[in-house]
Amino acid sequence: MLPLVLCTALFPLLSFAQSVKNLGSSGGNGPSGGIGDLNNPVLKAEAIVTDAFIPLKQNTTRQLARGKPPVLDDGTNTTKACPPPRTILIDDLNGKRQEMVGFGYSWTDSSVEVLSRLTPDLQDQVLRELFGQEGLNMGMMRHTIGSSDMSGRQYSFDDNGPSFNEGQPDLSLENFSLGEDGEAMVNMISKMNHYKSDIFLIGSPWSYPGWMKHNGLFIAPNLDAGTSYNILNNSFDRQYIPQAIAYFTKYLDAYAARGVQVNGLTLMNEPLNYKGGYPCMYLDSTDGADILNHGLGEVLKDRNIALLAYDHNTDQPIYPSQMLQRANGYIDAAAWHCYAYLANYSVMQDFHQAYPDTPQFMTECSNYLPQTGALNWQVVNAFVPAVQFGGAGASMWVLATDPDFGPHSPYGGCAGCQGAIIVNSSTSYLKTNDYYVVGQFSKFIRRGAFNYRVLKGNEGNHLTPNQFNLIATQNPDKSWAIVFVNNLNRTENVRLEFTGSANIWEGSIPNSTVTTWLLPADDVLRQNTTGPSTSTPPFALYNATSTAVGPAGTGGGKGNDSCVLPPVTLSTSSSASSTTTPLIPVPHTINVIEQNVL
Ligand SMILES: *[C@@H]1O[C@H](CO)[C@@H](O)[C@H](O)[C@H]1NC(C)=O
Ligand SMILES: *[C@@H]1O[C@H](CO)[C@@H](O)[C@H](O)[C@H]1NC(C)=O
Ligand SMILES: *[C@@H]1O[C@H](CO)[C@@H](O)[C@H](O)[C@H]1NC(C)=O
Ligand SMILES: *[C@@H]1O[C@H](CO)[C@@H](O)[C@H](O)[C@H]1NC(C)=O
Ligand SMILES: *[C@@H]1O[C@H](CO)[C@@H](O)[C@H](O)[C@H]1NC(C)=O
Ligand SMILES: *[C@@H]1O[C@H](CO)[C@@H](O)[C@H](O)[C@H]1NC(C)=O
Ligand SMILES: *[C@@H]1O[C@H](CO)[C@@H](O)[C@H](O)[C@H]1NC(C)=O
Ligand SMILES: *[C@@H]1O[C@H](CO)[C@@H](O)[C@H](O)[C@H]1NC(C)=O
Ligand SMILES: *[C@@H]1O[C@H](CO)[C@@H](O)[C@H](O)[C@H]1NC(C)=O
Ligand SMILES: *[C@@H]1O[C@H](CO)[C@@H](O)[C@H](O)[C@H]1NC(C)=O
Ligand SMILES: CC(=O)N[C@H]1CO[C@H](CO)[C@@H](O)[C@@H]1O
């Protein structure tokens, strides 16, 4: 366990507020978000609890359940908590940091395929549960452009031949087509937008068409060509830069023609991943920058689409810096993944120091083979440090799968990546523990919230065996959504104080849970000093002890699902401008990526 002082020392440089207003998005700062926006202010303190324990029998643990709310210490209660509470200090005075975009998941072909198997009623229900304000209200979604490892077959939008790897160059992209799978995905995303129109939607390809890659020649350093990775067609051939630009433009056109506005783009999912045979592609930062500099950058600017650089692990942090320096003015954000053994999120702090105006995201983390009977910390171990170190949003991998973690690629597709939703049949799906844990963030932290520095109270982190961590965000209505991770193997009493506000909140965070506190804004509290309100909360909760299915769309059991929020109102596009970042030396290089060896 780290001494508490270390926790303050961790964040000395992230002191000013970073804005995401320049990110292409139809959302902006509400007001159509849900609880915590100006139309749905928090009126009363709440605690919402999800157990980390994955039970053997479904619905026997707390899942977004209402817990004992914290109380304001008004000085009249002389009974001291036992054991003495942990003091938490939030720096509301000087600790305003990054603006939040949202939390969510990833649309994959597997997700689209299994949700398509559901009866229309059930499909409607699950989409509402995921995206509706009365459901998880996700604010950020990634989607795959063409096939990924979570696709039953390999394809691009312009194979131009009998299969992905057998096509001829299509220089004018005349055979570009979303195809059956691409149409199914844009159609599903369009349905998603019916439930929530202001989701920050990021597109990422797992490969460009096979004919845009080198064939058989590229052997990257540290790849053992003698092993099973013997199909080495996996690096971009830069003679096809004009076609790559046209490919992205046609994809954006096709989505727009079907009514789906893409808000963010990464040039390549995991550009340093070059496993032969696997749906991936090596894209050097020089080539990536040239794709932007030779035309795609202007296309994205014209359409108000943010370019997120990198989209890969924290162990090669130089790549997004190189992109920023090489594609001057076309990089709006950086994107990180959680893998590389255990992610080192402090590289996000280094990046922020060098590029203080460039927002960051944690765009991919998978829960691999979660076990019943065990504690599940995978989501919080990705989301919490990502936000603590400056992330404006985070998305887990694979929204939905079948019970066998599929469909996935026959070429090394993830054999144990579990969806948030598992679809068993056309009439049955289940929501996993991950689903509820993501909801502890996505349901309560609105776009336009700001993350604040926590000066005291955190202990340990995702790399230590035990931890107590929190993130403190202030929503647009000035209420606080505070997400706690308690992996101390005990219930923890806490006393939460601010550097500015005089309010002191007391309560306890149950053992082995992710718990979200909603604390009303000061001016709401001032009008409500006469005791607890009895009004129903302005959001639906799940009830772990209930076995009955609630009304369609509430996702919960009997009891406290009766309160349904007003329908989502459609919002219009906001304009955005992109920033120009001056060249600055790369701040920190623990590893140097291989240069373009082709
Ligand atoms: C007073 O504080 C104690 C210890 O924190 C707590 O258990 C108790 O519920 C509080 N009483 C009231 C009326 O808030
Ligand atoms: C590409 O498009 C042309 C013109 O539409 C068509 O004749 C040809 O068959 C297509 N090729 C493939 C491989 O689909
Ligand atoms: C994480 O990265 C920081 C630099 O950001 C470095 O100082 C530290 O040693 C790294 N930690 C680990 C465990 O690799
Ligand atoms: C769905 O399938 C899983 C795995 O086979 C099983 O554990 C679960 O009970 C099933 N759920 C329903 C609701 O049928
Ligand atoms: C958690 O606490 C219980 C009760 O004190 C103890 O039996 C158990 O060994 C602890 N578990 C861990 C992982 O420390
Ligand atoms: C905390 O919760 C976990 C998971 O339910 C349980 O195994 C453990 O015994 C609990 N610890 C205590 C001290 O109650
Ligand atoms: C204050 O609380 C009362 C109930 O106790 C509630 O009716 C009222 O709406 C609250 N006022 C504000 C401004 O939230
Ligand atoms: C668990 O709860 C969910 C939501 O409340 C419900 O749809 C599902 O049928 C329940 N499953 C079981 C096995 O009770
Ligand atoms: C749901 O919660 C409200 C507010 O706490 C309470 O008044 C109501 O009785 C609960 N309903 C059920 C069925 O438990
Ligand atoms: C859960 O549901 C049961 C039965 O419907 C009800 O008695 C209980 O009060 C509910 N619990 C919560 C926390 O709403
Ligand atoms: C899987 C695959 O398509 N492999 C191809 C890689 O490139 C070489 C050389 O062009 C082909 O012979 C392989 O078939």
Image (cartoon, rainbow, N blue to C red):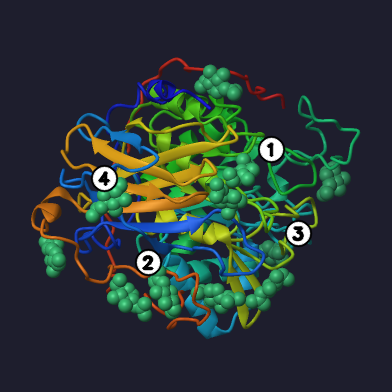
Q: Position of residue 216 (x, y in %)?
A: 82, 38
Q: Is residue 388 visible?
A: yes
Mark 3 or 2, nearer chain start: 3
Mark 4 belongs to which amino acid? Thr
| Tally of marks | 4
Residue at point 72%, 63% (across, down): 406
Q: Nearer the viewer, mark 1 or mark 2?
A: 2
Farthest-out residue, top = 585
Q: Quadrant of residue 234?
A: top right
Q: Residues within 10 Å of mark 4 (few under 14, many from 20)?
A: few
Q: Position of residue 518 (x, y in %)?
A: 30, 54
CB under 8 Å between callouts 1 and 3?
Answer: no
Label 3 vs label 4: CA separation? 76 Å
In this orientation, which residue lies closer to the viewer: 398 or 145? 398
For the residue labelled by badge 4, is the local secondary structure a helix, a strand or a loop? loop
**Residue assigned mark 4:** 79
Q: Residues within 10 Å of mark 3 (few under 14, many from 20)?
A: some
Q: Nearer the viewer, mark 3 or mark 2?
A: 2
Mark 1 or 3, nearer chain start: 3
Indicate yes or no: mark 4 CB to ligand 1 under 8 Å.
Answer: yes
Q: Which mark is drawn over residue 161?
A: 3
Q: Which mark is drawn over residue 415?
A: none
Mark 4 or 1, nearer chain start: 4
Q: Which mark is drawn over residue 196?
A: 2
Residue at point 49%, 51% (across, down): 513
**Residue assigned mark 1:** 273
Q: Nearer the viewer, mark 2 or mark 4?
A: 4
Mark 2 belongs to which amino acid? Lys
Q: Residues within 10 Å of mark 2 (few under 14, many from 20)?
A: many
Q: Is residue 371 above or below residue 426?
A: above
